[in-house]
Amino acid sequence: MKLKSIGALALLLSTPVVAQWQIDADASRLHFVSTKNAQVTEVHRFEKLSGELDKNGKLAVTVPLSSVNTNIAIRDTRMQEKLFEVEQFPHATFTAQVPPTLTELETGEVIQGEVDGTLELHGKTAPISFEVIVSRSDNMLTVTTVSPTIIDAKKFDLGAGIEALRAIANLSSITFSVPVTFSVTFTQ
């Protein structure tokens, strides 16, 4: 009887435990790129994000849009007020059902795949996909984009905000296509 109990315990301890994963905000980065006057390209970021990946592969990531950081304080304020309208739309949210092949990795494994989900931004919702590399080390999953995903600002009713920013800055143009990249670390 003791032998069976010890064998069962050993089996349980050797089986990976599937638990909920939380975003480590300090170790995670979310960047986007803007292009103005058809030639000037700048990389910006969001300072905060949170989220979780549950044991069934349900992913939810929330980005407080007030955490935008362009390295120019007045531009950050203008983006919060004129583009994102954070008083009315404080967050962007990405949700997805992540395939088990990307979540059930053993320590040391690395895999490339696609995450298809839905982005809710500025009161609008649209499908979006990210090509990612996922790596596992101990109680950590790191998910990094393979290449930028292009977000069409018009799909999220951000055209008027971009036009307002263009006019305030006296620019000839600001593109509506916004490349997004990230490296997100989840811990258990």
Image (spheres, rainbow, N blue to C red):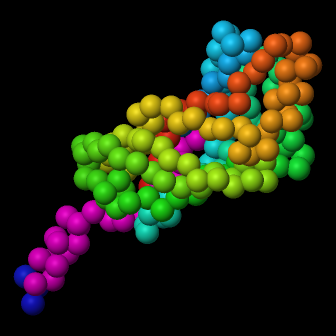
Instruction: Residue at 58%, 53% (x, y): give it.
Output: 127
Can residue 52 be seen by looking at this rendering? no
Say how many tags the image has.
0
Foreground residue among 125 and 92: 125
Q: Note whether 148 is above or below 134 in the view shown.
A: above
Instruction: Residue at 7%, 82% (x, y): give it.
Output: 3
| Residue 123 screen position, x and y as percent | 79, 53
Q: Is residue 171 left or right of residue 183?
A: right
Q: Is residue 173 left or right of residue 39?
A: right
Residue at far bottom of view: 1
| Residue 32 screen position, x and y as percent | 62, 29
Instruction: Residue at 23%, 66% (x, y): give it.
Output: 15
3 is within the stretch colored magenta: no
Give the magenta-colored segment's residue range: 4-26
Quadrant of the rendering where the C terminus is positioned: bottom left
Quadrant of the rendering where the N terminus is positioned: bottom left
Q: Note whether 94 is above or below 108 in the view shown.
A: below
Q: Is residue 105 left or right of residue 31?
A: left
Quarter-wise, where is residue 150 in the image?
top right
| Residue 87 screen position, x and y as percent | 90, 46
Instruction: Residue at 63%, 20% (x, y): give it.
Output: 43
9 is within the stretch colored magenta: yes
Quarter-wise, where is residue 5 in the image?
bottom left
Quarter-wise, where is residue 108 in the image?
top left
Foreground residue among 115 and 8: 115
Can residue 118 be seen by looking at this rendering? yes
| Residue 81 screen position, x and y as percent | 89, 35
